[in-house]
Amino acid sequence: MEHIIFYIFSAILVLSALMVITVRNPVHAALFLVLAFFTSAALWLLLEAEFLALILVLVYVGAVMVLFLFVVMMLDINLTVLREGFTSYLPVGALIATLILIEMALVVGPEHFGLDSVAAPVPHTAGYSNTQALGNVLYTVYVYPFEIAGVILLVAIIGAIALTLRRRPQTKYQDPSQQVLVRSKDRVRIIKMPSEKKRGGA
Amino acid sequence: MDFTLPNFAPAMPEIFVLSMACIILIVDLFLTEHTRVVTYLLSLITLIAAAVLTANLDTAEPVLTFSGTFINDSMAVVLKLFIYLITFVVLVYSHNYLRTRQLYQGEYFVLILFAVLGMMVLVSAHSLLTIYLGLELLSLSLYTLVALRRDSVSASEAAMKYFVLGALASGILLYGLSMLYGVTGSLDIGNISSHISTSIATPAEHSIVLVFALVFVLVGILFKLGAVPFHMWVPDVYHGAPTSVTLFIGTAPKIAAFAMLMRLLVDGLGDLHSQWQTMIIIVAVLSMAAGNIIAIAQTNLKRMLAYSTIAHVGFLLLGILSGTLNGYASSMFYVIVYALMSLGGFGMIILLSRAGFEADRLEDFKGLNQRSPWFAFMMLILMFSMAGVPPTVGFYAKLAVLQAVVEADLVWLAVLAVVFSVIGAYYYLRIIKLMYFDQPDDVAPLAAGFDMRLAMSANGLAILGLGLFPSGLLTLCARALNP
Amino acid sequence: MDMLSTFWTTVPVTLQIVIQILAIVLPLSLAVAYLTLAERKVIGYIQARIGPNRVGPRGWLQPIADGIKLLMKEVIIPSGASRALFIIGPILSLVPALIAWAVIPFDDTLVLSDINAGLLYIMAVTSMGVYGVIIAGWASNSKYAFLGAMRCAAQIVSYEIAMGFALVGVLIAAGSLNLGDIVRAQSGSLAHWFWLPLLPLFLIYFIAGVAETNRAPFDVAEGESEIVAGFHVEYSGMTFAVFFLAEYANMILVSALAALMFLGGWLSPFQGIPLLQGLFAWVPGIIWLLLKISVLLFLFLWFRATFPRYRYDQIMRLGWKVFIPITIVWLLVVGVAVLYKLPWWFD
């Protein structure tokens, strides 16, 4: 049963990954990528790594790909221009890709990573929590790499802001706190003045 | 759960630099253009204090901490000290340059400090994980620094090329690292090394996968070093980036890249020496050939120095491939000396430049002797040193490396290296000819401030001084690798 | 009763699960239908009107009539639309709102799937709801729909961060990702429920929940006065009804989660009070849960009748510059409180 599920999800994963690079429409490609993420999350669930699976969906499907779609939809990407010269490069590219593929298959074939060289993982007991297990090593054994990863993200934030934030003097900003604090007497001044007598005459 | 707090003491410099970078980031928010000098001074103080902290570390024995992901040994201490020194001088050189070009932002200093942190992590890495993360921290900071002048088309193009190619190289490196992990089952460099030495003793069926992994790892490292055939990014990035950033990229990160080479190739895959020696020989010869020959055709000094970097990397690799302690020490000596020379070379471009004038073409150096004999002399020392003319330190650096190569019974390689050096000497000497025998096109007096002049003079004199008395640094390098 | 349970064990497991799912989804659909009626009635009374009162006694059959009307209408697919995605859009917005109910515990034992990472599952599943709106907006090939979709994407991604942080606070306080354990961690009394120690997080969670469901005053994705009806401007008939269903199902889901995580779920509010506790001991837990959900749903309707719509930049400012900093600070507070075992809640 588990095997059947695995093969179904793997097939969907490979197919959608293939579609990502072959479909004409970039929005469709992004959506196939979402599908690919989703099925890989399902594969992780089969490996009892529910934390990683759910985080993959939460972060990649729920946030990263949404922003990605946002950008892809906003930009009007003309794929025909991007594909120019595709056919003329195809033979060389295909040749090199096949060569590399064959070489890699010869060198790092499954015989080096099969069950006889790497022990099969032991299925966990029912009470096993993947989240807890990850947390236990992440904040103890791997705390130093974990912290550096945090620093890398900080640098990414600084870089993104430094490269994109521009102060535009002509843009007018509102200060909501001031808007809220405004009192009626700041805007309207009521002046009491005695009514004037009609000029006599006429 | 059993868990004891790790020993934080060996990582104090890293912790300090990280904290200071964050503090500077916040302090800078409250500064205006006129008071930004506080950021600059704080960055300098950070580097000095980090140097003091690092120098006070006990290095009698290599210390592992954070579950073996961090190592502190004498090589780490020496390399870190030179990284601080070079970054310090980089900041001094670039201070005025930044102010006259609307680049005087707090982010510049913060990113440089983060890059320094990345280099420190890399130098002290003892796990595939920390090597990769340190490298990414360094690279990410550098990509951003290159792009920091965002209105410049060439800077954006350089940043884009650097980023795309760098990401590709990181991917290749990561693939190699994952293969290593797959074969050895460990991320720890010590474990990997011992696993390989046992599996080499018994005829192993995995060794082919190991070599496969080695190729990918090597490609990743050589890309970061900028060796041929992975050098395409170097001239474009050096040329496109603001000179103050080129100055930084061309100096300190080379030391970190050397450390990465040592940790991965020598500490981790040392038993595969016979495998990687041939690969590195090819790359070293190609680098020396391509770097020295293409440099002759350049008219832009930044591009010329970029190709000279490629040639120097070839030389640096010669020491490593000899596979002896002596060879590693000579490489370490070479990389430190190279960083100092390169610092002076790019510093000179900054010294001659002023607002609206970059001074990065060869013609801009015409008749420098008439404008400022002292700095023409400094440039003369730097160019002699890069060419490897005695009594400058560049000569001893080349000599030490060649000795190591000869000791490894690769006399033909040493001869080849000498031939390429002679070819390379042509374009260094051409600058000297321009400075001393040509009439200046531009007679404006040098605009550099006192701090810049002082640092530049110290830099030039250090090259000369180290050339006259090279034994101190040589023994320092030898002792750092063999305490 | 015995016969019933023996009969239940003879049913194949797959069929058992299907029956359980139906037992959740059918009442949920009914609840959605009557929530629409409640909305019209409540807002009607708030605005001093009566609301629908013609179909059936007191208008009780109004949702049925609405449903039949929408079913009968033609589904129009615009000529320039991306056909497949146009149909997938509404489905993608409804499905996450339904599958999230799989891990919602209705009382101590009544839960379809009692998984360890329940909270994470909820966050992952609800984060997918936005695809329905984005795809619908893009596939419609209409400027208004597209604008609505873009607004919605930016808004949901922004508020998801604050919402996620609020949930992390709950996770720290309860020490578990299992929704049942989270409710159990709140037992004690009314003051033990997490709304009190996590008050800022509770408020932010609920407001972010309103924003995530695109409800007033955060309904810029629809914004009928500026972009007609936003992302579903081109939808009609059944497809429109599905969007409608999804919105209300999401409201119920957000309310149910708020009730579970901050208001003690199925726990009785009189727990720990000597006399009343015994007096109300006969009330099953599920009733309390449904009551709490109803109160929160009423808040949704109340908001809609009270607040004017936020402007887009104000929404962004509130999400990024107010909510996220507050949640981060409060996470620190909760962390310290848990670490030092602050009496009453975390001892």
Image: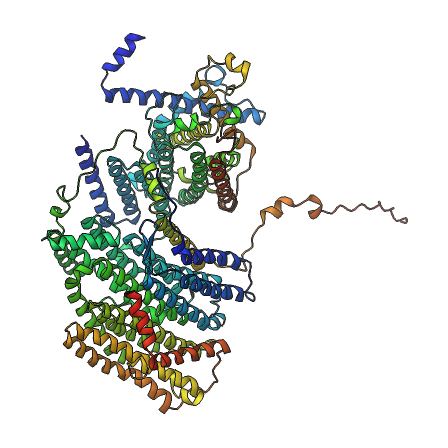
**In the image, farthest residue toward the left:** B203
Q: Is residue A102 visible?
A: no
The location of residue C340, given as percent across then percent down, is 49, 36
What is the quadrant of the N terminus of chain B in the image? top left
Residue A117 versus residue B476: which sits nearer the camera? B476
The location of residue A140, given as percent across then percent down, is 36, 44
Which quadrant holds residue B321?
bottom left
Residue B364 versus residue C218: which sits nearer the camera? B364
**In the image, farthest residue toward the front:** B60
Identified at 27% across, 29% down, the residue is: A126
Residue C176 versus residue C317: which sits nearer the camera? C176
The location of residue B68, given as percent across then percent down, is 31, 51
Give the answer, above or below, for where C313 lies relative to B97. above
Which quadrant holds residue B15?
bottom left
Give the answer, above or below, for where C191 lies relative to C287. below
What is the quadrant of the C terminus of chain B in the image? bottom left
Q: Is residue A133 visible?
A: yes
Identified at 56% across, 65% down, the residue is: B35
Which quadrant holds residue B349?
bottom left
Identified at 24% across, 22% down, the residue is: C14
Give the answer, above or below, for where A121 lies relative to B176. above
